[in-house]
Image: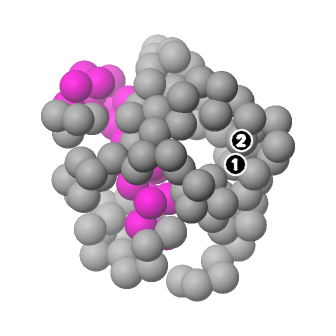
Amino acid sequence: MAGHRIFTTPFASIYPHYVAKVERKGRTKGELDDVIHWLTGYDEAGLQRVLDDETDVETFFAQAPAYSPHAELITGVICGHRVEEIEDPVMRKVRQLDKVVDEVARGKRLESVKRGG
């Protein structure tokens, strides 16, 4: 999946969709941000900088301060693909984030979403 167009999409254009998804299901932006912080290591200021600078998705993950070692525990199907079987490392990270956002939206406890991290 090298060169997939999602890689060059600004994270700032995807983030509002994540916010809308979790809020539509009764969860909060704060809960979403908490999971993003856990997965990527970005703090609040770092995430805001990414959004303000319109950093693309590939760079967002490449510059993640501390990508969670527990991310490998994120498994299951998202968009018809098994997360753990995706070979491209950037696409796997994109789908890992998609998966945890879905779990937050479905009401899963944040401790479970974070896989003990």
Which amino acid is tagged 2? Val
Query: Does 93 lie within the magenta span?
Result: yes
Q: Which of 84 and 65 is in front in this view?
A: 65
Q: What residue type is labelled 1?
A: Phe
Q: Residue drawn 59% across and 24% down?
A: 44
Work out whether 59 lies above or below 99: below
Which quadrant holds the N terminus? bottom right
Number of marks drawn: 2
- Image quarter for residue 82? bottom left
Q: Are marks 1 and 2 in contact (CB under 8 Å)?
A: yes
Residue named by callout 1: 11
Label 1 vs 2, first from the N-terminus: 1
Cα distance between the residues tagged 1 and 2: 7 Å
User: Residue 13, how many percent across, how many down?
Assistant: 76, 45
What residue do we see at 63% from left, 64% from top? 58
Above or below for 55 versus 85: above
Residue beneath disc 2: 50
Above or below, 80 relative to 71: below
Decide: few, some or many residues near mark 2? Use Cα within 10 Å; few <14, some 14-19, many ≥20.
some
Q: Which residue is drawn at 50% across and 46% down?
A: 65
Circle 1 SS class = helix
Magenta segment range?
91-113
